[in-house]
Every structure is written in structure tokens, then in C-alpha cells.
Image (cartoon, grey):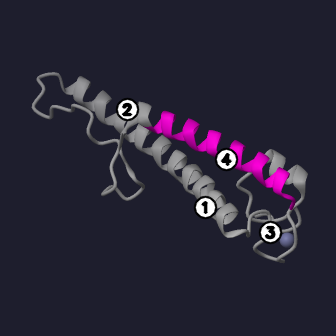
Amino acid sequence: MNKRDTEKFKKKLVAECAGLETELNAIGQKDPSAPGGWDVSTSDIKVDSADENEVADKFEELEENAGIASKLEGQLNEVKAALDRIEKGTYGICETCGKAIEIERLEANPSARNSIKHKH
Ligand SMILES: [Zn+2]
């Protein structure tokens, strides 16, 4: 891959990274000690609340957010791994066959690890 293409994908990845962090910030807090790097459990749940339904709703919301967060964290990790590969000079190389990943595949998914033939 030439330098211009690499720079183009790097910009896309950096923007994607920022977007994912914004989404994660909306539902949780950055926490290096959390397994995925984000903590969504700090919502102000008062277990001793008088209204049981309210507590149940809160827990439901939290569970939903935790699901969303882990999906976003997964995407964020993929994007960060792709940025790492750019730094190491291995970006755009299929992890299965070692050949260049098709540009159109990277256009659709800049953090792709495998060629079209070897995508999972
Ligand atoms: Zn391949």
C-alpha cells in the first residue's frame, strides 16, 4: 500500500476512534481498570430506592448500556489495532494469507484484518 492510501485510512481510523469514544462517553466513563476500558456501572443506582420499578428500569438500562459498551469497545479495539499496524507498517496485509487486502474492502472497513477471500 502506498503512503498516500495509508495516510487516508489512518485519518479514517482516527476519526472512527474519536466517534466511538464519544459514543462510549455518552453511556459510561473511561476506566483503565475496567475489563474493556470503560465503566458503565457508575450510573447513580440507588438500590434502597422506594420505587422498585424504577430500580428495575435502571438495571435494565444499565444492562442494555453494558451490551452496547462492550460492542463499541470491541470496535474501538479493532480500530486501535489497525492504527498499531499502520505504525508497524503491516497495515492492509491479510493475516491469513499475507497478501494485500483489497482497497475496496478497506474502504468499507478500514480496520479489516483479512482479505475478502479470508474474511470471517
Ligand atoms: Zn487473505
**Pointer 4 and pointer 2: residues touching (CB < 8 Å)?**
no
**Pointer 2 and pointer 1: residues touching (CB < 8 Å)?**
no
Which of the two discs, 2 and 1, sits closer to the camera?
Answer: 1
Q: Nearer the viewer, residue 45 or 14?
A: 14
The mark that comes first in sequence, 2 or 1, is: 2
Whether residue 109 is visible here, answered yes or no, is no
Dot 2 lies on which element?
helix
Is 95 covered by the magenta stretch? no
Q: Is residue 7 above or below residue 50?
A: below
Bounds of the magenta segment: 1-24
The mark that comes first in sequence, 4 or 2, is: 4
Disc 3 crowd rating (10 Å Cα; few below 14, some 14-19, many 20+) is some
The mark that comes first in sequence, 3 or 4, is: 4
Q: Quadrant of the N terminus?
A: bottom right
Q: Is residue 31 above or below residue 98?
A: above
How far apart are the alpha carbons under marks 3 and 1? 13 Å
Residue 61 marker: 2
Q: Residue at x 34, y 41 (%)?
A: 40
- Label 4 belongs to which residue? 13
Disc 4 crowd rating (10 Å Cα; few below 14, some 14-19, many 20+) is many
Q: In the picture, residue 56 is in which quadrant?
A: top left
Measured from the top left, where is residue 39 in percent x and y? 34, 46
Q: Residue at x 22, y 31 (%)?
A: 44
Q: Residue furthest front?
A: 3
